[in-house]
Structure formats: structure tokens, C-alpha cells
Amino acid sequence: MALIRAIAIQGLEMALVLALAPLLTGFVRKLKARLQRRAGPPLLQPYRDLRRLLGKEVVLADNASWLFRSAPYLIFATTWVAAALVPTFGAGLMFSWSGDLIVITALLGSARFFLALAGLDAGTSFGGIGASREVMIASLGEPALIMIVFTLALVAGSSQLSNVALFMLSASAGLRVSLALALFGLVIVALAENARIPVDNPATHLELTMVHEAMVLEYSGRHLAMIELAAFVQLLLYVSLIACVFAPFLLAPVHASAADYALGIAAYVGKLAAGGALLAGFETATAKMRVFRLPNLLGAALMLGLLATLLLFVSRTL
Amino acid sequence: MIAALLALIGALLVLGLAAVAMRRSPLATKLVYGGALVLTLALFALAAVALASLGAGAREAALPLGLPWLGVHFRLDALAAFFLAVIDLAAAAASLYALGYGAHEPEPGRVLPFFPVFLAAMNLVVLAADAYGFLFSWELMSLASWALVLAQHREAENVAAGTLYLLMASFGTLALLLGFGFLAGPGGDYSFAAIAARRPEGWVGALVLALALLGAGSKAGLVPLHVWLPRAHPAAPSHVSALMSGAMTKVAVYAFIRIVFQLAGPPAWWWGLVVLALGGASTVLGVLHALMETDIKRLLAYSTIENIGLIFASLGLALAFRADAMGAAAALAMTAALFHAFNHMLFKSTLFFGAGAVLTATGTRALDRLGGLIHRMPSLAVPVLGACLAIAALPPFNGFASEWLTFQAILLSPDLPQWGLKLAVPATGTLLALGAALAAACFVRFYGLAFLGRPRSPEAAAAVETDRASLAAIWGLAVPCVLAGLFPGAVIDAIAPAVQASVDARMPVQTGLPWLTIIPVAASRSSYNGILIFLFITASALTVAAAVHRFASRAARRYRAWDCGFGDVGIAAQYSAASFAQPIRRAFGSTIFRATDVVEMPPPGATAPARIRQSRIDPVWDGLYAPLVGFVWLLADRLNFLQFLSIRRFMSFVFLALVFLLLVLAVWH
């Protein structure tokens, strides 16, 4: 009985992630449009886009290999599995122990690896631009994320995300300088990894400024739908990650009742909305950076992560 | 057991001699590599059995060879067994690969005699239990590999690489010789058992650490002693390159562990600091060089420096934990180091084999002349992709599992009491994380340019699949990459006796845990389960793909690439090796390598072409080796007059030298 319940909750979590991901992106787009005094697309537009794309035939470049055709499913699957490891509304997920925060980071790295390879597969110049810029951004963003993971793991005494979340929920967490630095770094990494302003512009169609869009330029139909969905899920993942570590309130504990879970889901939706609103506000207020200024921004995130970890190493004996 | 091992090694040496005798025979290639395959497989099986059965015990043997009153001592313990298994698995795969690849060798007589000798020497280094046997085998290994580097001696580049290698190898052996001298002291008993019982005090230990770093580090390719490695490793035939990168660097790691962890006495806390710093520096410098390299074999050699850096960083952590008597943490760090050594042997050998196959199929090692090989060489493209994923430390492959263990060891290090370590460990952690991310970038570039895209030269467009023996060897090492990643607990338990032998502690047993999860430290409750992650990814990818094909659309059409509407602007418009690396070169290279791009634009109306000139320096070569070379030249010039003295003066120099040495001996006692 307990097993069925655990599986049901894990399944519900994975389904919820999938169902809410396009909504979050639609919400951010709508809010951004309103902030810019445009009407903007309807809230449910991402779902319609996905349905339309799924129904269309795929146009493959002449040179595309099997890697190009299988990459969208692999990218989506790794991102989804990574998202399944992040506690959204409840901490005691059944399979949360199969990977820790380092695994989540590396799973996102795998998705990026395949995406960059797919960008190079068709043998076009734009695919190359996108892939080479993406790996440059990731080569600074990923270590920054690892250092932030170190910070969280040292604070909570475990690199397991559900343990971190439960620790943050307990009274012993308190306010720490390291956590503030980590939050700041994590936000920068999240903006970079999700191709948001100021790193990349998700709405651009000016070729020379594109990163993510340039890599997926050759994709169409169902393949593009899978990649778009993976991008939606990744945005949701980062918002959930920040929420469950830095705003874990109302997270359902390990053996929670149905009411606790309901409350957890309601709170989770609220957190997502707050995260989306902050993102929309930030993107409206900021301009995109030149590509070669990005190492400074991401280097700052890396240094923040290192500083946060160093503070913890040093303060252990004080 | 050790007698059987020695007999097999002896048979390898005999095979080398036999190869000299039959070097003109057309069957020689098949016979030598076939024989080496059988012998090394037997050695691997024996080593694996020994690793599983020896536990804390050891087998010893002495042969009446070498110096008449000393003989040579051999000893097989769990640590030696682990490294024997690593070396002989790589050797067996290389022999199998060479059964196919060796047919393309222009001068087999320059490779065949040295190949089995090289294999035997690597095995002997690991088995040796006294300084004499160790140094003799070490030098034999260096010379055999040097001869193999010079197999294609008509290319000036290879000759220069061979000379540099010979210099560095002799220097390394000299350092080890001095190290053993200090360890044995004036007593003069050079067996490892006597040295370990002596427990050298204070400064001798520190001196031995420095000499071991010079000797073993130069063979492993630790920065700043790495300069020979990216020149010599690619110069050899590809199966030898694979052995030099995959196995010989592991022999160096073994030598370092044996000397520093077992013979040099109790470590001081700062030993770990030095090793950590060198490891961290190697990681980042190695991978940055690899990212900017356009020759596939040299790229792989630079990536070896990165992985050696990772192994040494874990060893540094293990040393620091050991100095502070944190047994469990030391065991975790040592497990990470040995696990990564094993993993690196697997994927680096696979990649070098793959590079060799690409070289025979296209005749070129330049990334800028490859492309599209996934269509032309489909059976090669899959295992090479697997090895790229593994070396990029992506789950669920083996490279990730060992890197994960290293990170878990770093998370235990705040408990170290010394301030120097408290500052150095997080900094090294940053370097390792940076190295891992850059390695992923590097292998996207490697695979994307060589195997994906459109062929950049007619040779690449006409490439054909490589032979079956080569493919069997490549698949034979790529499949264990996946297996070791899916079942890391089994590997951790298998290498536990070797860890026990080197740091006197071991990690908790992992195979009994539910669902084959690994939990390195019970207190931190951090866990990783490779098989579940793999199953989740596979299941969700297949389910989604099936659902999309069933309920949405399954139609597909081939057409010209869209490329934002520009149409087909030609193959040359693809990203090249230099253009892919350019953002990273600009982000990292401008400070470390002083990378510069100079664009020369002709004035309007002029018909001259525009040019771009790229340059970068190797900071280690320019900062350390170039002044050293200059100094040696200067010294040679100044001392030149010594060659033209009278016999009387020469005699007086000899006399003075004798007096000096006697004085030293008198003071020493």
C-alpha cells in the first residue's frame, strides 16, 4: 500500500511538472508582454504551439544522422528525469535518492551535450555558432552550479536535494551569508542555462545574437516540440530548485497526509507564479549582453559560488 | 600465482625476441599481436583473480637476476593486482586492435619487437619489490616506449618528440633513483620491505615526495612536467598511443602511490596541498590545451593530462585525509582516484583506437579535414560517442561515477584542521568542476567536428568502416565504460582491497545496498544510482518517442538544410576546429595563453586577401623550459674550454672530484 502510494506521488509529481511547464513559460511571456504594454499571446499559447508542432511532418536536413533524430527524445528524457529528482510539492519522493544535486547538474549537462551535438550534425554555420557559444556559456555556468551545490551540501550536510530541502525547512537553517551568495549565483546560472536575458534572448530572430535558437534551427515538427518542451521543463526545474531550497515553506514532509500534499501543490503553484513574475520583471528591466561580456557575468557567478564554499570551509572551525 | 605471472611476463619478453627473428615474415604481425593478446588476457585474468582473492595478503618471489648478491624481488599485493588488471586489460585490447590496425604499419619491424617488451616492462614495474628491479623495469618501459614513439622516424616532428621524451624520461628516472637512494639511506637495503620498515624521518620524506612528483609526475604528464606528453603520445602508432595514455600513465600513478603512500613514511599535512595544487593545475591547463588543439591524437593526449590531474587531485585529498588520520575519507578519495584511473584507461584507449581507425580511413588527423564520419563509419561512431560521454563525465557513464566520488570526498574536507587545506580544497574543487565542464565542451567539439556535419575533405567523404578486429577492441572497451557506470558499487567493492593496501582503510561495502545504490558516506546520506538513472532516461525517452509516433505524427521528409533561409552556402561554411574553440579561447586563452587574433584588412580597392593570424603561447614552455634550455646552452658555452685542457689538468679534476666525494661520505656518516 505504501509502495503504491509512493509510486502514485512520484507519478503525480512527474505529471505535474510536465503539465505546468508550458504554462509557466506562457505566463512569463504574457506578463512580459503586459509589462511592455503589449497584449501578448494567450496564456495557453505554448500548449497550442506544442500540439501544432506535434501534428506536423518533420523536415530533416539532408545530412542529418540518427543522432539528430534521437537527440530530441534524449534531451527531453534527461531533463524530465532531472526534474523528477527535484522536490516540487513534497520532499519524500520515492526515487529522490537515485541522484543528488551533482547528478541533477550532470543530467542537465547531458541534455546540453546532445543539443550541442545535434546543432553540429546538419553541417550548417548557424548550428555551429549556437553550439560553440552554448558550450562556452556552459563551461562557466556548470562549475558555478557545482560550487553552489557544494555550498548547499555543506550547509545541509548532504548533497541529496530532498535532504537539503528538509534541512532548509527545519529551524536550524537560519540566515547565512553563504546562502545569500549561493542564491545570487544560482539566479545568474539559471538565467544563463535557460537562455534568458541578459545571456540570450528567447524571442530573438536576429541570427548573430542567437545561442539556443541557433542550435535548434534545423529542427521542425515533433522534434522541435520535444526540444521546446524540454526547454519549458528546464525553466520549471530551475524555478522549482530555487523555490525548494530558498523558499521551502509548505513543502509536504516525508510521510504527509493528503491535505498536506494539497497544500503543498497550492503553495508550489504560488511559488512558480512568483518566480515567473520576478523573471518577467527582471527581463523587462534588463538589456541583453554582448556574447563576449558573458564570461564576466558567469565568472562572477563562479566566484560567488567559490566564495560561499570558502566561507563555509573557514567558518567550520570558528 | 606470482610464478605464473612472472612466467607469462617472461613469455612476453621472449615474444619480443622472437619478433626480431621473424621481422621479415609476413605472418609476424598476426603472430606477435596474437601472442600478446593471449598472454595479456591470461595476465589480466590472473590479476583479477588475485585482486579478488588476495585481501590483505601478498605473494612474494625472488629471482637470481641482476646484481649477483642481491637478486630481484617481486611482490604481488592487492594494489599491484589492481594496476596489473588495468594495464593488462588495456594491453589485451591494444593487441586485439593491432591485429587489424597493425596491417597498415609501413615498417612493422620497428614496432613488433618493442611492443611485447613494452607490455612486459609495465607489468614488471608493478610487480617489482625492490628499487633495483623497479628502476630497471621502469627504464625498460621508457626505452621500449621511446622506440615505439620513433616507429615512424622519418618525420622530423616525431624525432624531436622522441628526443624530448628521452630527455624527460631520463630525468624522471634520475629523480626516482635519487628518491630511492634517500629512502634506503646509507644502510643500502633497497628492498621495499626494508624501506617501509625504516620509516624515514622529517625532511627525507619531504624530499622523497618532491622526487616522486618529479619522477612519477613526469611520466604521468603532471603540469609542469607534461610538455613531452602531447608530442610523444600521438607520434606512436595508435595502439601504442592508447597504451601510453591509458596504461603507462597508470604505471606512473602506481609508482607515486607506492612510493609516497607506502615507503615515504607518515605524510605531513602540506604534502596533500602540493599534490592538490599540481592536480588542479593539470586539470584545467590540460583541457584548455585540448580545446584549442586541431590534431585529434594530440587533443586526446592533452585530455590525458586533464585526467591525470583529476587522479592526482584525488590522491592529494587522500594524502591530506591520511595525514589528519581521517581513514574513511582517505579511503573515499583513494577509491575515487583508482576508479578514475581504471575509467580513464577504458575510455582513453577507446578514443585513441577510434582516432587510429579514423586515421587509417581518411589518412589525416586534422579535425578540419574530417566530418560526417557517423554516416561513413557507423559501427565506429557509436562506441566513440559512448567514450566521449564517459570522458565528459556525464551520467550514467563511468567517468561521472568516479568524478562524483571525488566531489563527495571534497565535501568531507571542511573537517580538515589546517587553514592551508581549508583554502586549497575549495579552490581545487572549482578547478575540477571547471575541468569537467571544459572537458564536455572539448568532446562536443571532438565528436561534432570529426563525426558529425558534412565531410570537410574528399578523404573524409570516401572513408570506409574499419576492420573487425579493431572494432571488436573498441567495442570491448566501450561496453565496460557503460557497465562500470551502471554498477559503480561493484567496481568500488572490487578495488576495495587495493584501497585498503594503500591507505589502510576502505569504503563501506556497497553491493549489499538496496537497488544497487552507492552511498559513500553513511552520515551524509548522499547517494547515486547509475542503473536507475539509466533506466529512467531510457524508459521515458522510449515511451515519449513511442507515444509521439503513435498519437501525433510519424511523417518525415528529407530536404536541404534550412540554415535560416541562406540555403546551401557550401561545406566550408561549417564551423571549423578554430571557430568552434574561438569563444572559449577568447574567454580563457587571452589571460592564460596570451592568445591573440590579428586581422589584416586590405584597404578598400586593394585585391589582397584579408588575413587572420592566431597565436598562443604555452605558458609552461615559455616560462620554465625555454629559460632552462637557454641556461643549458649558456653553461655549455662557458664550460666549452674544459674540453681543451691538458691531460695533467684533467687528472687533477679527477683527483678533486674523488676528494670531494670522500668528504661527502665522511660528513654523511
Image (cartoon, coloured by chain):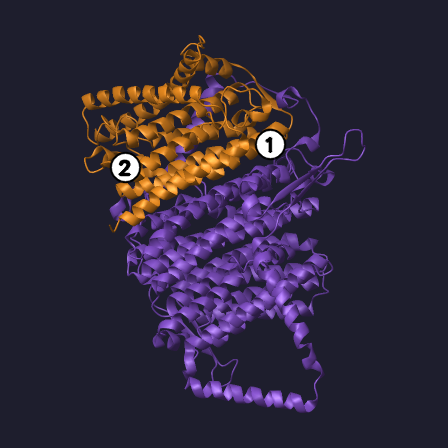
Residue B623 image point, x, y percent: 57, 57
Q: How many marks?
A: 2
Q: Quadrant of residue A105?
A: top left
**Circle 2 residues within 10 Å: few <14, some 14–19, many ≥20:** many
Query: Is any part of residue B334 visible from this angle?
Result: no
Which chain is represented by orange in the image?
A
In the rendered image, the residue lying farthest to the bottom is: B648
Q: Please tell me which residue lies in front, B139 or A270.
A: A270
Q: Residue at x 68, y 48 (%)?
A: B360
> Which percent across, then down, holds residue A187?
38, 31
Residue at which label 2 appears: A164
Q: Which chain is purple?
A: B
Give the chain of mark 2. A
SS category of the residue bearing label 2: helix
Residue A4 to residue B130: above or below: above
Residue A125 image-quadrant placement: top right
Q: Secondary structure at mark 1?
A: helix
For image coordinates 64% across by 52% down, the residue present is: B100
Location of mark 1 (residue): A128
In the image, residue B27 sits, relative to residue A166, either above or below, namely: below
Q: Earlier in the sequence, mark 1 or mark 2?
A: 1
Packing grade of label 1 (10 A; few <14, some 14-19, many >=20) is many
Amino acid carrying mark 1 in the image: Gly
Q: CA distance from mark 1 to mark 2?
A: 38 Å
**Which residue is more in the foreground, A256 or A318?**
A318
Give the vertical position of B235 relative to A2 (above or below): below
Residue at point 24% right, 34% down? A168
* Whole-percent x, y for residue B315 in the image: 40, 58
B637 relative to B399 in the view: left or right = right
